[in-house]
């Protein structure tokens, strides 16, 4: 099983890559950002993020509900910094865009391929920066698989060279003993992205067919 993290600046595309190994399997980190997407009938209206149970035209409403609820439940457990809950961006175009990111990445077998190549670019605001986590082999796209991946990402805070990330409010975890990209052996970027106080929203994308794709990849884009 693998979870993948990437970070990008909207001003200068600066990121790093590396890999390490932990309980959840191989992890890597990459970089880049922006947004557009196609349209489908039946999802949320543009500019009106959902709260509570999610309905999505692509059928991944239950997985998106699990995604936002799990992230916010984990953020609520952080005692080092008071973290506000993130808003789920659940518009038709954004969902189509992040689904395409996950689908393209899986087809190329390259985590963050779309995010790094900016194709498709999935922006919904005007952020100074954005970031992406990605769940690849082993998790699937069901609500349970999504929750498992997010928990494994959050648990990076317990790993060597990640403890300094807890309570770190610097962009990209630029604090002592917080190794965002895994250059010292274990990547902390997933936890950094999930616990960042400078992000306020997330979009969750899925590859494959809903409601379950045991081999599908999924992405979480943060702004």
Image (spheres, helix red, strand yellow):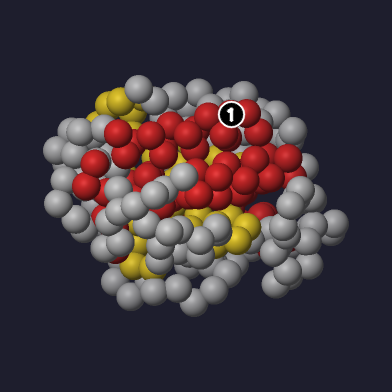
Residue 194, placed above or below residue 23: below
Q: Position of residue 208 (x, y in %)?
A: 66, 35
Q: Secondary structure at mark 1?
A: helix
Q: Residue at x 38, y 34 (%)?
A: 155
Q: Nearer the viewer, residue 70 or 60?
A: 70
Total residue callouts: 1
Q: Residue at x 70, y 29 (%)?
A: 212
Residue 176, placed above or below residue 141: below
Quick check: 178 left or right of 9?
A: left
Q: Position of residue 127 (x, y in %)?
A: 45, 73
- Residue under label 1: 145
**Can you tell which quarter of the image residue 21 is in?**
top left
Q: Residue at x 69, y 64 (%)?
A: 49
Residue 71 visible here:
no
Q: Position of residue 101 (x, y in %)?
A: 54, 50
Q: Position of residue 84 (x, y in %)?
A: 51, 61
Residue 62, placed above or below residue 202: above
Residue 210 visible here:
yes
Crowding around mark 1 (Cα neighbors within 10 Å: few <14, some 14 to 19, many 20+) is: many
Q: Residue at x 38, y 44 (%)?
A: 190
**For the view shown, which residue lies furthest in the front direction?**
79
């Amino acid at each position: 099983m693998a979870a993948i993290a990437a970070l990008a600046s909207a001003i200068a595309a600066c990121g790093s890559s590396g890999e390490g190994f932990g309980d959840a399997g191989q992890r890597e980190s990459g970089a880049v950002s922006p947004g557009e997407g196609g349209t489908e009938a039946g999802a949320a209206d543009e500019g009106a993020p959902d709260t509570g149970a999610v309905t999505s035209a692509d059928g991944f409403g239950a997985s998106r509900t699990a995604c936002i609820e799990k992230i916010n439940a984990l953020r609520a457990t952080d005692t080092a910094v008071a973290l506000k809950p993130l808003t789920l961006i659940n518009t038709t175009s954004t969902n189509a865009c992040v689904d395409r990111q996950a689908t393209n990445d899986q087809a190329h077998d390259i985590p963050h391929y779309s995010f790094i190549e900016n194709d498709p670019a999935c922006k919904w605001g005007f952020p100074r920066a954005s970031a992406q986590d990605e769940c690849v082999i082993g998790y699937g796209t069901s609500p349970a698989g999504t929750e498992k991946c997010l928990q494994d990402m959050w648990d990076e805070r317990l790993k060597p060279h990640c403890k300094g990330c807890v309570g770190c409010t610097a962009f990209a975890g630029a604090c002592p003993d917080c190794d965002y990209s895994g250059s010292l052996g274990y990547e902390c970027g997933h936890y950094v992205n999930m616990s960042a106080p400078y992000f306020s929203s997330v979009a969750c994308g899925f590859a494959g067919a809903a409601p379950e794709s045991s081999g599908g990849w999924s992405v979480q884009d943060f702004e």
